[in-house]
Every structure is written in structure tokens, then in C-alpha cells.
Amino acid sequence: MKTCIVPLFTELISIAMKTVGLAEPLRDALAPLAAKITAAFAYGSVAKRSDTAISNIDLMVISDSVIYADVYAALEPVSSRLGRTVNPTVYRRQQLARRVKKGAAFTTRVLQQPKIWLIGSEDVLPA
């Protein structure tokens, strides 16, 4: 019986990390890029708290100097550790503002959803 406890405990920790402990590992993964990122947040099922242990993690990253490849490379190790795919979307500030002004469906929907802030706050988003 004793030998079953450690694997069970490890699996419980893994489940907890996959479902509720996502912000800190994601924030840590983005930390090397944080000075170049205006804002970063999780949205979708994770932010709505309707995700499962296998749901993708959707992230919005706003930066004028960081590109998708940089963000993807920073997030890949945490994606592997969590056992969940992290899907970053990266916009430059002007690009995001244009999309908001045009009423682009995806952007508008994401900005209206609940968010888990990793870097920055609602104040940096275009109105």
C-alpha cells in the first residue's frame, strides 16, 4: 500500500497544476521576455474556469518587439511540464488597436472575456 501513495500524490499534484496552478508557471516562463511585453493574459476556458486537465491554454501577448517564435520558445518547456498545449497569439500594440477599432470578431470576443493577467493589466488595452 505504501508504494502506491507516492505515485498517487505525484498525480494529484500534476492534476492540481494542470487545472488551477497555471498563472505562476506561465508568468515564470514569460519572465525573460517581460521587459519587452506590454501585456500578457490567459483567456478562453482557462480564464473562465471551465477548462479540463487536457484543455489548451490560450494566451494573448501584446508586444512591439517580441515575435511569435520568441514567445513560443519561452512557453514550450512549461507546456511540456503542464502536459497542455499553450497557444499564444501575439499582436503589436498598433495592430491590436486597429483590430479593436475595426471590431474584428476574434479580438473583440477575447477582450470581452475573463482574463488571467500574467503581465500588465486591463489599463494597457485599447478601449
Image (cartoon, grey):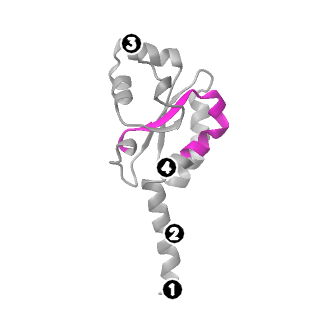
Residue that appears at 60% across and 43% down: 29
User: Horizontal and vertical percent for residue 90?
Assistant: 51, 27
The residue labelled by disc 2 is: 10
> Residue 22, which numbered label?
4
Q: Is residue 50 magenta?
A: no
Q: Which residues are magenta?
A: 26-45
Residue that appears at 64% across and 34% down: 33
Q: Amino acid at mark 2?
A: Thr
Q: Marks 4 and 2: CB-CB under 8 Å?
A: no
Mark 4 / mark 3, whichever is N-terminal:
4
- How many C-alpha atoms fall within 10 Å of the one at disc 3: few (<14), some, or many (≥20)? few
Is label 1 in a helix, a strand or a loop?
helix
In space, the residues marked 3 and 1 are separated at their CA atoms by 61 Å
Give the mark toward the camera: 3 or 1. 3
User: Horizontal and vertical percent for residue 122?
Assistant: 46, 28
Is label 4 in a helix, a strand or a loop?
loop
Relative to residue 92, is residue 116 depicted above or below? below
Is label 2 in a helix, a strand or a loop?
helix
Mark 3 / mark 1, whichever is N-terminal:
1
The residue labelled by disc 3 is: 101
- How many C-alpha atoms fall within 10 Å of the one at disc 1: few (<14), some, or many (≥20)? few
Give the mark toward the camera: 2 or 3. 3
Task: Indicate the quadrant where residue 30 lies.
Answer: top right
Q: Amino acid at mark 3?
A: Lys
